[in-house]
Image (cartoon, coloured by chain):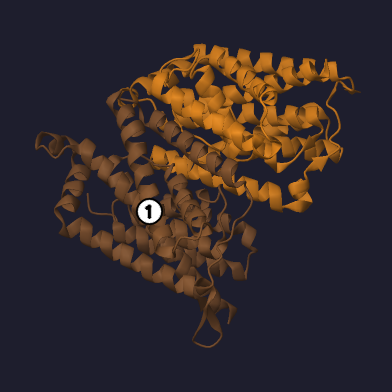
Chain colours: A brown, B orange
Amino acid sequence: MLALQLLCNGIVTGCALGVVAVSFSFVYATTKIFHVAHAGVYTLGGYVAWSMLGHGFPTAVAVLTAIAAATALGALIQGLLYARLERRKATHLVVLIASLGTLAVIQNILAAVYTADILRFNLPWGAEVFRVAGNVRLTMTQLLTVVVSLVAYGGVMWFSNGTILGKQIRAVASNPFLAEITRLQPRRVHIYVMAIASALVCLPGILVPMDFGLQPYNGITPLLTATIAMIAGGVGSITGAFVLAIVITELQNMSLLFIPGEWSIGVTFFIFVIFMLFRPTGLFAAAR
Amino acid sequence: MDFWFSYIALASIYVLLGLSTNLLVGIAGIFSVSQAAVFGVGAYIVAFFLMNDITSFLPAMAIAAVCCIALNILVTLPALRVSGDYFVVTSFGIQLLATAVFTNWTDGTGGANGLPGIPPPDLAGKALEESWQVVLLCLGGMALGCLIFWLVMRAPFGRLLRAIREDELAVAATGKSVLRAKVSAAALAGAFAGTAGGLYATFLSFIDPSSFDLDASILLLTMVVVGGARTLAGSIIGPFLLLALPQILTLVDIPTTIAAAARQLIYGVLLIAFMLFRPQGLAGEKL
């Protein structure tokens, strides 16, 4: 029974991390920036939603404000930091260090304002329990997480393949130089990409803490799992990132049957090493 | 006086770590946030050997250095074979994993409570009980580290590393193995970090996981960025400046509950500001 419960929990968390992986992959495939500060955007979303709810705003308003804040933050990071560095022809390493600095800034502002203690969402409707098949229990939050994540994944797929902006973004991703001379304005597109990815990552950023609570330094582990999923799924493949995030979280959750929870980071990392050694291009990699 | 002793000893240890980070980040151009993990492995190994009276100080240091070299080779080799960005993931992973080990493997590391009562270092059979002796030992370690760094950078190997930073493709075209050079640089960085860990453990006689977490790695990176990448001067200036920062912060009235966050916030701001306005740091070369 425990195994079945863990399996279900794995799917829930996996879907949420899938969205993180998709959003990260979106940024990485287009801008080629290893956007470490994404973990900070993820964390910020949860905190904004938490404070809005704390001030008595309805859930929908709180979530929308959080998404707006995350979107603005993402666009700002791109416009004020990454774009400037790019104009100065900064090396990849410089951009990475700046991104890490941004992550440290966001996390520690949150830690200074809200303290490093764990904060819990107090939502009566979220704790409502459903019984799924026998003794397996899922809360309302968990069901919502799965639904929202699947919708977000579908939305990204549709956006990327079915809309003009989505196609422009893919064009910029595949050949920035050609995009520049055909007046696609890669710089502007990069800002859109960061804004969209930040809005996306805000969803799991709110939903996961509803289950596990909020902490300022809690964004790194999800981001690490998400980046591993992106690499294992094949960089550039949205489906690959999403599916592998679920698979990895599932393996991590099932490992709880044999290994205590504090070592689960080791399990995730072990999966990464295996992929790195045997299939570094990922499972869903496009033919090159 | 005690304050100056501990400041100088800690700064010398961090200079060794700065050299280590500089080799990896500045010279080999590998982004690493797991330097503190390697530092910690060195510290725990030396603590283990000295507390259980297995060997004396110098052999324990040598073992720690060898283990850290092996660890760094093991960590960098598979990731760098594929791409630099893979190493970012590896590096975060190793750091989080190391923190998990330091915190949860209670039998070996004392868990979150740390390991108290690490005996003082000994040289030629005599224990260095006085604090000035340990300070001299740390300064000696720093001087030796600086000398090795200087010699290595002058040697053909140092020129190869510089050439890789200028143009990796050109170096590969001349038949040199870029991967091998990078992994060797990482190995040397491991030796420095391991030695620094041993000095740290014996100087403080107490270690706990909080000295070796991700924040510590970010501090090390900030030291190199502020001091300046790729130069000896940079690796010395950075640690001495940044270790003075907490003391300066005590002059400003900040509630103790947010002091740690405020410190890390400053490191983050420094990282961004230097990358934007002065990527070469105070006394370094182009990053």
Callout 1: 10 Å neighbours few (<14), some, many (20+)? many
Q: Which residue is mark 1?
A: A67
Farthest residue to the bottom: give it. A134
Is A78 drawn above or below residue B237 in the view shown? below
**Looking at the image, how many numbered discs can be counted on the residues?**
1
Q: Tell me the residue at 70%/34% (across/down).
A: B64
Which chain contains the residue that carries disc 1? A
Is B29 drawn above or below residue A47 in the view shown? above
Using the rendered view, name the quadrant where residue A17 is placed.
bottom left
- Is B45 situated left or right of B125 in this image? left
- Is B67 situated left or right of B55 in this image? left
Q: Tell me the residue at 42%/71% (across/down).
A: A144
Using the rendered view, name the quadrant where residue B12 is placed.
top right
Give percent across and percent down for residue B74. 54, 41
Q: Nearer the viewer, residue B182 or B207?
A: B207
Q: Is residue A246 visible?
A: no
- Is A167 situated left or right of B74 in this image? left
Q: Tell me the residue at 32%/41% (across/down).
A: A75
Give percent across and percent down for residue A226. 43, 54
Give percent across and percent down for residue A160. 21, 56
Q: Quadrant of the N terminus of chain A?
A: bottom right
Farthest residue to the left: give it. A182
Q: Nearer the viewer, residue B235 or B7?
A: B7
Q: Is residue B114 visible?
A: yes
Give percent across and percent down for residue B157. 48, 19
Q: Amino acid at mark 1?
A: Ile
Is B16 drawn above or below residue A112 in the view shown? above
Q: For the residue labelled by badge 1, is the local secondary structure a helix, a strand or a loop?
A: helix
- Is A172 situated left or right of B211 in this image? left
